[in-house]
Amino acid sequence: MDDFTSKKDQIEKAISDSILKEIEEEKLTEEDSIKIIDYCLSQLKSLNTQEQLLNFLLDISTKWPFLATIAEIEQGMQKEAKNDEVFNNITDIAQAGNIEEALNLAKTATDN
């Protein structure tokens, strides 16, 4: 199983857990939960990129606000991964002796 498939499985579980919680708290009917699950599962199957996944999560959090936390967590994780990648690039460039280039990249990264 690749990382992206694993990520989709994690998202599917998080959605299911959130739906179950809403049912238990009587904030969602079983009939509505089936519609939400069907929609989410059919959409998840067609996703191939992190960007598509994030757009999907933003879409469902708009349709069903109780799912917004999942989108927020994923956004944070993607931002953290991007920051880690930039940090690693800066480190590699600096270790290669290109200090000026590393500083420019660091400045650009902190400006964004």
Image (cartoon, rainbow, N blue to C red):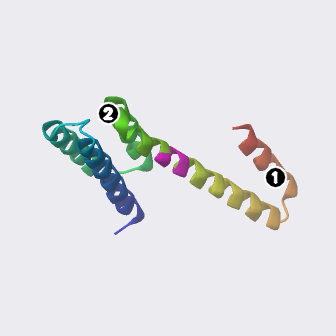
The amino acid type, in three-letter code, at marker 2 is Trp
Q: Is residue 75 magenta?
A: yes
Residue at the spot x=36%, y=30% of the render?
Answer: 62
Mark 2 or mark 1: which comes first in sequence?
2
Dot 1 alpha-carbon crowd within 10 angstroms: few under 14, some 14 to 19, many 20 or more? few
Residue that mark 1 sits on? 101
Residue at image position (83%, 50%) is: 103
* The C terminus - image quarter: top right
Between residues 44 and 70, which one lies in front from this camera angle? 70
In the picture shown, does residue 64 fall above or below 84? above
The part of the image, by quadrant, that contains residue 25 is top left
The residue that label 2 is drawn on is: 64
- Residue at the far bottom in the pictured view: 1
Please provide the residue range marked out in magenta: 73-77
- The overriding secondary structure of the stretch rendered in magenta is helix
Secondary element at tag 2:
loop
> Residue 75: x, y in percent?
51, 44
Element assignment for label 1 = helix
Query: Who's the residue at 27% across and 45% down the image?
Result: 19
